[in-house]
Image (cartoon, rainbow, N blue to C red):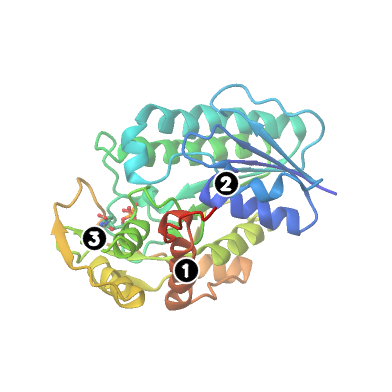
Amino acid sequence: MNRVLITGAAGFLGSHLCDRFIAEGNQVIGMDNLLTGSLKNIEHLFSHKHFVFYHHDVSKFVHVPGELDYILHFASPASPIDYLKMPIQTLKVGSLGTHNLLGLAKAKKARILVASTSEVYGDPHVHPQHEEYWGNVNPVGPRGVYDEAKRFQEAITMAYHNYHGLETRIVRIFNTYGPRMRLDDGRALPAFMGQALHSENITVFGDGSQTRSFCYIDDLVEGIYRLLMSDYVNPVNIGNPAEISIKDFAEEIVKLSGTSSKIVYKELPVDDPKQRRPDISKAKEILGWEPKVSRLEGLRITFHYFQTLPEFQPKTESVS
Ligand code: UDP
């Protein structure tokens, strides 16, 4: 049985990874400082005999007793609203945190996979984005704290591979959605679905012509699993290439939810990328991976998840 450390375990991606690695018969150590994660996402695992949870901030020295076979570093604030609120923690978890986990991987002779992001491409001049594109990032803009932390993370991960011969993997994650996203994380999808469920206006930023490409969580997890098990050390894009403008995306959610909400337009945030779509040729060729879940199907599952949250249930009065 392999022992796997997953950081950011109580987050959206981390919790789904915990589920997958448990299902594959591993022993999983979930670690999180609960800054943006929630224990609700992993409470179903607490009774599992092969799961333990450590409440710890990986920006500080990380100690894990016993052997480790794999480390997946997924701890970080990851939505624009979160990293704008927590710029220093975001920089620290991507830099100091990654350094600590690389050191741990070296000490344990473990293979480490780090969660990078399409944000390393910034507001891209190359479309779709392939892994050889170096990006267009503003280091001192509001998104710089996340983008540059992730770029540093890739650099130090490669340095540990080249200098120490550490087994490393780098996944560049494009917009991903699904159950357990936080309703209040400010991202387009939970914002639109929450607004639809509250019958509030749907807030599209800018004129909504900016594009994104949304990947369903199960597809992402499969891609990450395959990358970890592969022997490929350079960064690999994992995402769904089906690209859509944010305006059309908002309209899809209005239709799907049956809401009477109206779409309204708000100011576009600074450095908001104008277009984003992964070139997934590498993932296809090296991992034999491509997304399977259509946006319509994924959006339905996710909407149902939000719809069944306690806050959207009718208030019932107890009868004594
Ligand atoms: N967005 C929007 N309304 C919202 C939240 C986000 O129009 O209430 C836009 C945002 O400006 C961006 C796109 O939707 O152009 C995707 O935003 P998200 O935060 O989901 O992801 P990211 O910008 O990190 O790709």
Residue on which the image places disc 1: 304
Residue 318 position within the rendered picture, expressed as x and y whole percent measured from the top left: 50, 54
Which amino acid does the dot numbered 2 rest on? Answer: Lys
Q: Is residue 290 above or below residue 15?
A: below
Question: How many numbered dots are placed on residues in this image?
Answer: 3
Marks 1 and 2 sit apart, C-alpha to C-alpha, by: 17 Å
Label 2: which secondary element: helix
Between disc 3 and disc 2, whose residue precedes?
Answer: 2
On screen, residue 186 versus residue 47, left or right, reads left
Residue 169 position within the rendered picture, expressed as x and y whole percent measured from the top left: 61, 49
Which is nearer the eye, 194 or 159?
194
Residue placed furthest toward the right: 1
On screen, residue 211 versus residue 117, left or right, reads left
Which amino acid does the dot numbered 3 rest on? Answer: Glu
Which is nearer the eye, 104 or 90?
90
Quadrant of the rendered image holding ligand 1: bottom left
Which amino acid does the dot numbered 1 rest on? Answer: His
On screen, residue 175 versus residue 127, left or right, reads right
Residue on which the image places disc 2: 40
Residue placed furthest toward the front: 320
- Write the residue at 42% across / 61% down: 314
Residue 298 position within the rendered picture, expressed as x and y whole percent measured from the top left: 48, 71
| Residue 92, visible in the rendered structure | yes
Residue placed furthest toward the top: 61
